[in-house]
Image: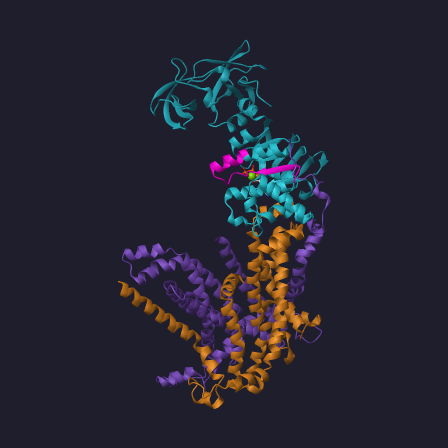
Chain colours: A orange, B cyan, C purple
Amino acid sequence: MRRRKTRHTLILHGVLIASALLTVFPLGLIALMAFKTNPEIFANPLALPGAWRWQQIGKAWTDGHFGPYYLNSLQVAVPTVLMVVIASTLAAYGLVFGRLPGARYALAAILLGLIVPLQAIIVSLFHDLGDMGLLNSLWGLSLAQAAVGLPFGIFMMRSFFLGIPKDLIEAARLDGAGDVTVLRRVVLPLATAPALTLATLQFMYSWNDFLLPLIILHDPSLRTVTLGLFYLQGGTYTLNYTMISAGVLITAVPIMVVFFLLQRQFIAGVTAGAVK
Amino acid sequence: MASVELQGIGKRFGELSVIADLDLKIDEGEFVVFVGPSGCGKSTLLRMIAGLEDVSGGHLRIGGREVTDLDPAKRGVAMVFQSYALYPHMSVRDNMGFALSIDGTPAGEREERVMAAARILKIEHLVDRRPVHLSGGQRQRVAIGRAIVRDPEVFLFDEPLSNLDAALRGEMRMELARLHQRLGATMIYVTHDQVEAMTLADRIVVLDRGRIQQVGHPMDIYGRPDNLFVATFIGSPKMNVLDVVAGETMGGLLALSHPDLPPLALAVDGPSMAQGSPLKLGVRPNDLRFDVAEGGIVVKVDFVERHGDQTIVNCETESGLTLNVAIPGNVDTAPGNTHRLGLDSARCHLFADDGRLISRRPESNPARSR
Amino acid sequence: MTERLDQQSASAARRRGGGRPLGTAIRYLIFLGPAALLYVPFVLKPLIETFGLSLFAWNGVSAERTFVGLANYARALGDPIFWISLRNNLYWVVTSIVLPMATGLVIAVLLSAVRRGQRIYAGIFFTPVVLNLIIVGLVWGIIYNPLIGPLNRLLRAVGLGSLAIGWLGDRYAATPAIMVAGAWTFFGFCAVIFLQGLRTLDREQIEAATIDGAGPFRRFRKIIVPALSDQVTLLIVMSIIGSFKVFDIVYVMTKGGPDHASEVIATYMYWQSFMNGSLGYGAALAVMLTAVVAGASLAMMALRERD
Ligand SMILES: Nc1ncnc2c1ncn2[C@@H]1O[C@H](COP(=O)(O)OP(=O)(O)OP(=O)(O)O)[C@@H](O)[C@H]1O
Ligand SMILES: [Mg+2]
């Protein structure tokens, strides 16, 4: 019986490891390619590289302008995350505890944003951003991303606030706390966990966003990492597989590292984000 | 401490009128208990006094000061919630001192007042803990402590003990009585629990469907209920109610008839009853005599509840009417036994069909303390 | 006999700013102001404008727009590429319900049976979910590459060389090829959702069935699958929404080509609006897409509300 159990476990792990390898196989393949020369790639894409040519990664980093692109991505994602977390928390607090007459109309307007796909607004948004002089600007991208991410942020913070007992807020009111004090000293200290999950999720959205940068950022020097990677396959590098593979490596590895460090947060966030 | 005065207070939630035109004056230092069935508006009334709920009409005065539209924090009231509502991210000390930290009381004085309250409630050793690390009873004490620290004119309690187990509830009840004596503050207390109401209150306010049914000393409420609702709501086990028919009135005595009862006459003053009008006769289980030799009501025992100090016998008359009898100590009977219950007309309450009082049991103990 | 705790004056005298309740207008401003500042100009206004724009013919450059009523919507009905796009979206719906959900379910059941390493496995299967679709598109673009792609090498190695084609350049193979890449980014998500569902499943239920003599296959069908019906519903609705919104992965792998063969509504709308200068028509496509996605999203919210 005991032996049978062990054998079961072994088979189970065998199947899981095989599936896991199959899952990461495409990524591993690309990672190897990044170190190969183009002739090596053409000879046999599955073979190991003849040498670990780290300089190819370095070259892709410089030629692909990934340094500035990483800075651009950060310059977009950080304000986006801050805007979404702050505006969502305030709005959700107002909707739940703010004693706002007509709050349900505001809520309905926000829910509308939750069910409408980005494609529904993209053409008009492009022209409106142009009218406001926000095209071709990292700030413009931040604002657009934050606005698009906001409905989900409000929705998420709101469902958390709805779980805070009303008595707690009323006790604070009786203790002499005004709206700002209740928010700052009672609600916010309780809301750090959902706010962090929201921040993680929003950071990922912003970092991985493609459509908004594609239409907003025209100047090559303003590209985000994701957009820069996209343009790597066009233009002069059409057939440079080494370059593309190195680019994938450069952009994927940091995401994966952050993901494995914050795995719990990520998975919680993405599954919570399932409503969007 | 301060008086609390409600004048013509009403409350509507949209179309639904929960409380209508309610008047009540609570004296300085008084301990007043609101009782009534679930949904009758006790909490709503308390929350209007606290300022957590707007009033739809009328005036509210605390200590003679008009507070109808005043912010909750400025009314000089403190409230203890049924859920305790302790701030989960703060220590007991910070929970109790929260109000003082908001109004800018210096840290030293704050600490002094928090510790003084903690001493009264015997929770000094808990001040550095978070609420999650406290038992239910300890949380209750912290919630009360948080109210004490603010040194309010009026304490408001909304079913503060209902989350505690029976033993702890009894203990905290005495604690609250002691606290009231010690602080002398005005206290308004909402409860479902009759024992709490009877033991704690200087005056009980019985509410039903948003209206005051009776206000008075606990013994008055118990002994001299103003209507059928109060009569049946207060007292455990519940007062027995029999449907009787009015007969002739002669010499201030009204004859009553009921198929299961021997002839009965009750002293009534006021206008005479139309013969044949339906009435309600109320008699408390402990006012029925068990096992009289002759006469009385013939009943069969249905089941017996032995409480130790008293025995409650649930019986049925021949026509199927259920009567409860409470007998001090133990009693020798078993289901199926037949007994005779003695009914003394001097111990009965009489109500009109709509619950209005017609005649009540003369006061048994006029020398009650007040 | 009354003991006062505080002999000092009533504390109400000392009152600082934070304690003050705010007026209604100020509360609106503080709490909803920042959100409105973002939401109104960058979401609400463009949304309304898109509806308006769908009633006009406009090339995006000239000052004049011509009101055409519902002509843009009528145009879609007679546009073969619109029907190709819509058909492809529907293929996406079917594929993304079948492929990743089935894989995810199997993986979840396997994962729920292991004691050690569950988190690590889950992390690996979840990795493609967090990668952006440009990375995914490039990676799979290389897999499918006719010259260097390992897929064709593999086919030739096993003697199926006749099947080795330029996957993404083939009008019949392009859409399925992209959908496989899409499934790769979704099955790990399905697995995690199913795993959460399985955690709530009573272990004793399975053990009871085992004692009753149910084999592993029967246990899977009769107990595990019915217990996961909530998760299945959630994932199906999500698949529908995601399949209609799909854009990035198609755009990076084929741009909708060859000759619009792998086009979906979103890429076609992008092409009409930004490449072809038919903004009114693009807007009409966007409105139709919105109707489908919003409908599915509402269904999803109703489902969530239910439990
Ligand atoms: N915010 C509200 N909106 C609508 N109706 C309400 C609201 N709050 C209370 N009510 C209604 O007002 C009535 C009185 O409620 P209240 O909470 O005061 O009852 P209660 O006497 O405290 O009952 P319990 O003993 O169950 O606590 C109930 O019918 C309740 O449904
Ligand atoms: Mg209540």
Which residue extends farthest top? B251
Q: Which residues are magenta?
A: B151-174
Residue A21 visible in this rendered orientation of the protein: yes
Specify whether C23 is left or right of C298.
right
Q: What residue is drawn where x is 50% and y is 36%? A: B169
User: Which quarter of the frame holds ligand 2?
Assistant: top right
Specify whether B32 is left or right of B308.
right
- Asked which quadrant contains residue B13, the reply is top right
Foreground: B240 or A167?
A167
- Asked which quadrant contains residue C218, the reply is bottom left
Which residue extends farthest bottom? A39
Does B169 lie within the magenta span?
yes
Quadrant of the drawing holding the N terminus of chain C: top right
Q: Is residue B251 above or below residue B97?
A: above
Residue A121 rendering spot, x and y as whole percentages = 61, 67
Does A264 lie within the magenta span?
no
Residue C73 visible in this rendered orientation of the protein: no
